[in-house]
Amino acid sequence: MALKLSLKPGEKFVVNGAVIANGDRRTSLVIQNKVSILRERDILKEEEVDTPVKRIYFPIMLCYLDPQNKDPYLKEFMLRLSELMQVVEDPDAKQKCVQISNEVMKGNYYKALMVCKKLFPYEKERLEYVP
């Protein structure tokens, strides 16, 4: 099944670790085979990893982009996820954490990333809460 990617002018994306930037016009690409691809909006830079959920997202992203060297990333992921699971009380957030773990263990890193992104609003709300 092909993946159609519509890109804005100047939008960047990563294909199997290579950063590619679109030119000055809107364009569409059709990816015909299986590759690890992330749009700029889904890429987290190391210096942006400043919250518990981002500390989970980042190693999953690295597993996705560099599956040959996934072992240290998986160890970091498991450590960070277990830390988060110990403090999260919200049932929906816990369920998402379990879903993330299941997808990672199956090697479905992209799916795990998309579920993890759903935790960002929950985390933001909790971090901004002041009793």
Image (tube, helix red, strand yellow):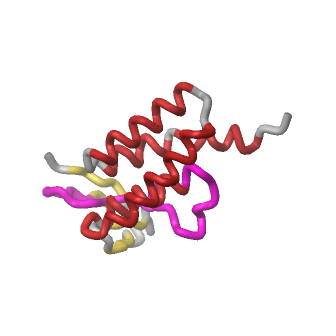
| Residue occupying image coordinates x 25% and y 51% | 4
| Residue occupying image coordinates x 60% and y 28% | 90
Measured as percent of width and height from the top left, residue 12 is found at: 41, 67
| Residue occupying image coordinates x 43% and y 65% | 11
The total number of labels drawn is: 0
Measured as percent of width and height from the top left, residue 73 is found at: 40, 63
The residue lying toward the viewer, choosing from 74 and 107, is 74
The residue lying toward the viewer, choosing from 41 and 29, is 41
Q: Check the image and name the residue furthest to the right.
A: 131
The residue lying toward the viewer, choosing from 67 and 21, is 67
Q: Is residue 8 left or right of residue 50?
A: left
Vertical placement of 125 versus 69: above or below? above
Q: In the picture, residue 33 is in which quadrant? A: bottom left
Measured as percent of width and height from the top left, residue 121 is found at: 60, 40
Q: In the picture, residue 10 is in which quadrant? A: bottom left
**Which residues fall within the magenta stretch?**
29-54
Is 1 one of the magenta-colored residues? no
| Residue occupying image coordinates x 33% and y 54% | 6
Vertical placement of 123 versus 90: above or below? below
Q: Is residue 94 left or right of residue 114?
A: right
The residue lying toward the viewer, choosing from 94 and 1, is 94
Q: Quadrant of the C terminus?
A: top right
Is 36 one of the magenta-colored residues? yes
Vertical placement of 42 versus 114: above or below? below
